[in-house]
Amino acid sequence: MIATGLTRRIDKLGRIMVPKAIRSEYGIGEHTAVEIYTNEEYIVIQKYSQKDVEIQSKYHTDNVGRIVLPKSIRKQFLLTENDDYVEIFTEEHSILLKKYEKSCVICGGQEELILVKGKKICRDCLEEIKSIVG
Ligand SMILES: [Zn+2]
């Protein structure tokens, strides 16, 4: 699995816009039927395969390639419309999404984060750096 380093915000209608370059790799354009399901960690998006006749595709990208994340999935992953972000990963046949948690780049902690040159660092780590340098 590859982390793209890209994040996208869930819009107010529960949609996300996966960057076109990524969608293109998987043959997902506008009005493309997709399968959306979840595993333990990720929301998985795959292009609907014509071969799987028994699977009825309920989801399509819209006219600009956005995908509505089903409400049940948004609920499961605690994703709030117009507020939360998802991080985008890719795998051989799938685009994977995960809630983007804001956390310290050093320890992964989520308390008292301070932004340093675009990276989040918690106060504890910052104090430790100061003590090493200082
Ligand atoms: Zn930290």
Image (cartoon, helix red, strand yellow):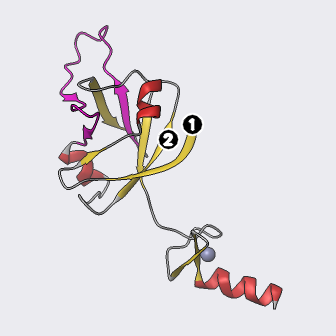
| Residue type, numbered disc 2 | Phe
Relative to 50, does residue 114 appear above or below in the rendering? Answer: below
Q: Residues within 10 Å of mark 1 (few under 14, many from 20)?
A: few
User: Does dot 1 land on a helix, a strand or a loop?
Assistant: loop
Q: Position of residue 67 (x, y in %)?
A: 26, 38
Q: Which mark is residue 1?
A: 1
Which quadrant holds the N terminus? top right
What distance separates the C-alpha of mark 2 from that of mark 1?
Answer: 7 Å
Q: Residues within 10 Å of mark 2 (few under 14, many from 20)?
A: many
The quarter of the picture showing ligand 1: bottom right
Q: Position of residue 84 (x, y in %)?
A: 33, 60
Q: Residue at x 28, y 51 (%)?
A: 76
Which quadrant holds the C terminus? bottom right
Give the extent of the magenta segment.
Answer: 42-69
Q: Residue at x 41, y 34 (%)?
A: 20
Residue 62 part of the magenta-drawn span: yes
Q: Which residue is mark 2?
A: 89
User: Does dot 2 land on a helix, a strand or a loop?
Assistant: strand
Whether tag 2 and tag 1 are in contact, CB under 8 A, the answer is yes
Q: Residue 118 occupies which quadrant of the picture?
A: bottom right
Q: Residue furthest right?
A: 133
